[in-house]
Image: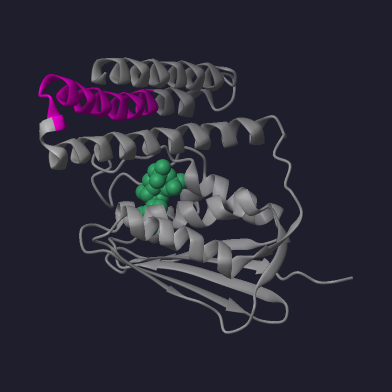
């Protein structure tokens, strides 16, 4: 049974990987050089979760872990985490694909920012039980006119980065402040920080800072912040970074509030 299950998972993963590479190749001409670096980086990144899942599923079948429920659960959880990571990577490339072809069509809905933030924070707290993730909501209600899926992705990306780069004892503080005109959201960590010379560049596609942390240990594609900026701007907002080496990092988003006409 476990053999069948693992074969099914592997088939699914291989299919996803092929689909991903295929979509990637459609845009060969753009950013040719950056793409070469990106492709080799992503190939490595795609291989890692697939290899880890393969090893975990292999262990489940080979060592008959049904007799050891605790270990079984541990390996299943590893597989789930890796699958989630793979899914995030595919999502990022699909978003990029949409943006290139001008297909990013935003929905226009009444969006409760506090509720969206709370959901993302809760999900991150579940996935990172040892990190300190603190949400400080606004006393005022915060609504805007926007796309719930993309806005949720924006919050997810910023908190995910804070956790990824923040190091072992990371503390992430998320605040939301609402005035009559503006919604100001801040995601602040006590991680290694980003040197000022990189502040503009981190929003470029594929750009990754090479010297603040060992990038080989922190997985990434250099797509997240570019996507975040695009979505914020498409909602009529602005994003900026306040950071320096050794001083942590804060991303501040300002978005216009919903106005009834
Ligand atoms: P990725 O995380 O996939 O590399 P992003 O576009 O999300 O891509 O981020 C670009 C770069 O900005 C990262 O590679 C990292 O060097 C830097 N960065 C982003 N967020 C943080 C943070 N909270 N702390 C330190 N560095 C960060």
Residue 56 to residue 243: above or below: above
Q: Is residue 53 magenta?
A: yes
Say whether residue 220 is left or right of residue 22. Answer: left
Residue 22 to residue 100: above or below: above
Q: Quadrant of residue 103?
A: top right
Say whether residue 247 is left or right of residue 156. Answer: left
Q: Give the residue displayed 64% in from the left and 78% down from the top.
A: 141
Residue 73 visible:
yes
* Stretch in magenta: 40-66
Q: Give the residue displayed 55% in from the left and 21% down from the top.
A: 23
Q: How many marks?
A: 0
Q: Give the residue displayed 23% in from the left and 61% down from the top.
A: 130
Q: Main secondary structure of the magenta part?
A: helix
Q: Is residue 226 magenta?
A: no
Q: Quadrant of residue 215?
A: top left
Nearer-the-camera pick, 19 or 212:
19
Residue 89, percent from left and from top: 44, 35
Say whether residue 223 is left or right of residue 11. Answer: right
Nearer-the-camera pick, 214 or 76:
76
Residue 256, percent from left and from top: 71, 68
């Amino acid at each position: 049974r476990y053999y069948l299950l693992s074969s099914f998972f592997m088939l699914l993963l291989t299919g996803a990987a092929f689909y991903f590479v295929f979509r990637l190749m459609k845009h060969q001409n753009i950013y040719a050089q950056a793409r070469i670096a990106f492709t080799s980086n992503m190939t490595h990144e795609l291989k890692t979760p697939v290899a880890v899942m393969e090893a975990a599923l292999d262990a489940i079948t080979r060592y008959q872990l049904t007799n050891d429920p605790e270990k079984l659960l541990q390996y299943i959880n590893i597989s789930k985490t890796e699958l989630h990571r793979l899914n995030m990577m595919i999502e990022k490339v699909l978003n990029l694909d949409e943006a290139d072809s001008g297909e990013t069509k935003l929905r226009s809905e009444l969006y409760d920012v506090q509720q969206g933030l709370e959901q993302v924070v809760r999900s991150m707290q579940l996935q990172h039980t040892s990190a300190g993730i603190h949400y400080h909501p606004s006393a005022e209600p915060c609504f805007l006119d926007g796309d719930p899926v993309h806005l949720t992705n924006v919050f997810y990306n910023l908190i995910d980065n804070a956790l990824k780069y923040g190091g072992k004892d990371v503390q992430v503080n998320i605040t939301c402040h609402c005035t009559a005109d503006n919604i100001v959201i801040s995601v602040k960590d006590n991680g290694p920080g980003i040197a000022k010379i990189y502040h503009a560049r981190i929003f470029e596609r594929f750009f990754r800072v090479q010297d603040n942390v060992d990038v080989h240990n922190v997985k990434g594609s250099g797509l997240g912040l570019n996507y975040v900026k695009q979505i914020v701007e498409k909602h009529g907002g602005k994003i900026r970074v306040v950071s320096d080496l050794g001083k942590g990092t804060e991303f501040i988003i300002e978005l216009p509030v919903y106005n009834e006409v």
